[in-house]
Amino acid sequence: MATWYALADLFLSRLDAETAHGLAIQGLKSGWVPRDRHPDPRSLAVQVWGRELANPIGLAAGFDKNAEVPDRALAMGFGLVEIGSVTPKPQPGNPRPRLFRLREDHGVINRMGFPGKGLDATLSRLRRRPRTGFVGVNIGANKESLDRAADYVTCGRALAPYADYLVCNVSSPNTPGLRNLQGRTQLADLLKRVQDAITATPVPLVVKIAPDATDGDLDDIVAVCRELSIDGIIVGNTTLSRPPSLASSRRSEAGGLSGRPLASLSTDALRRTARRVDRQFPLIGCGGVDSGAAAYAKIRAGASLVQLYSALVFEGPPLVRRIKGELASLLARDGFLSVSRAVGTDL
Ligand SMILES: Cc1cc2nc3c(=O)[nH]c(=O)nc-3n(C[C@H](O)[C@H](O)[C@H](O)COP(=O)(O)O)c2cc1C
């Protein structure tokens, strides 16, 4: 861990997790977080949806829900950053405390419930930023909405012009009933309506699913995505399951579990998805990535891009450069000249 972050962590780790997160956003806004000025190894460059990214390591949704710091996050060395989930109306989310570190397990449990400043606030920030880097926009539905699919349509139509890719998040476990949108009929209806709403803006449309999906769920999800020519799937969100190995006293908190205890479950779901997708469109692997080896495992299981969030809670921004260095070494060790050659090699 870099010295500057070891000092910051001494302070942040003593605070409630959500307060620490707020300070991290403020730190990024104020420019206290150093940039990663090192050029990425050439082998990490990836092509996706007609664009070239310097590396395949992304910041997952939930860190920058309101698009306050996408460019500062890119400057930490990420190849892509996803903001959101954005809902049409502002909403407070669930009562605090709702974010817990499972320090012994390198895991996190959250039951945030989409707190956010809403579509208009996010839109005005995105309008003001320069269109550089690769920034995805993740959209969701308000808790009290009577027509959830309409919420995705509203957000999708408004935000697509400012997104390098658009994600329909139908897998957060903290909005009651949201995961039902992963069902075959509901998903097809939702994605078709969003597609129709964004025809004027040709932006890749991606769906983010739960790592808890059964083989039957995946059959349906992948069939819908193939029928509608969806551009990608993110596998996946947090899990409602609790591996028996969890040691932290916080393990029984309600909410979605992320971080290291999610790694193998989500990589398995990714592999099962990749077998069904058969390279028809790219996959994004997310869940428990905290090392180059964990990122490499996702790539070999079929991911063209990888995302992380929870590991940042424990290791801070120096993590990004470490993962990139380790990944480049692993590719070189196995004789892969580029990330894309390693995608799906374990399938
Ligand atoms: C505090 C917190 C908030 C999150 N909020 C969102 C969200 O708003 N939308 C979403 O699609 N995923 C959200 N996620 C899920 C992450 O994007 C990611 O899918 C999950 O945490 C697994 O990755 P990780 O193990 O690297 O954290 C959130 C995760 C955490 C820990």
Image (spheres, grey):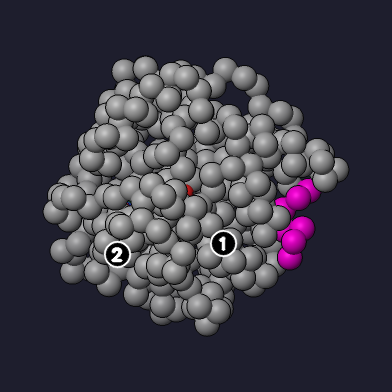
The picture places residue 293, in percent across and down from the top left corner, at 65, 46
Residue 224 painted magenta? no
Name which residue type carries label 1.
Answer: Ser
Say if 286 sits above or below 223 in the image.
above
Question: Does the segment drawn in magenta span residue 345?
Answer: yes
Residue 221 lies, in percent from the top left, at 51, 73
* Mark 1: few/some/many CA within 10 Å (<14, 14-19, 20+): some
Q: Residue at x 52, y 82 (%)?
A: 216
Q: CA distance from mark 1 to mark 2?
A: 20 Å
* Picture disc at residue 264: 1
- Element on which disc 1 rests: helix
Q: Which residue is mark 2?
A: 252
- Tell me which segment is drawn in magenta: 341-347
Q: Where is residue 75 shown, x and y percent of the image?
A: 49, 24
Nearer the observer: mark 1 or 2; the answer is 2
CB at mark 2 closer than 8 A to ligand 1?
Answer: no
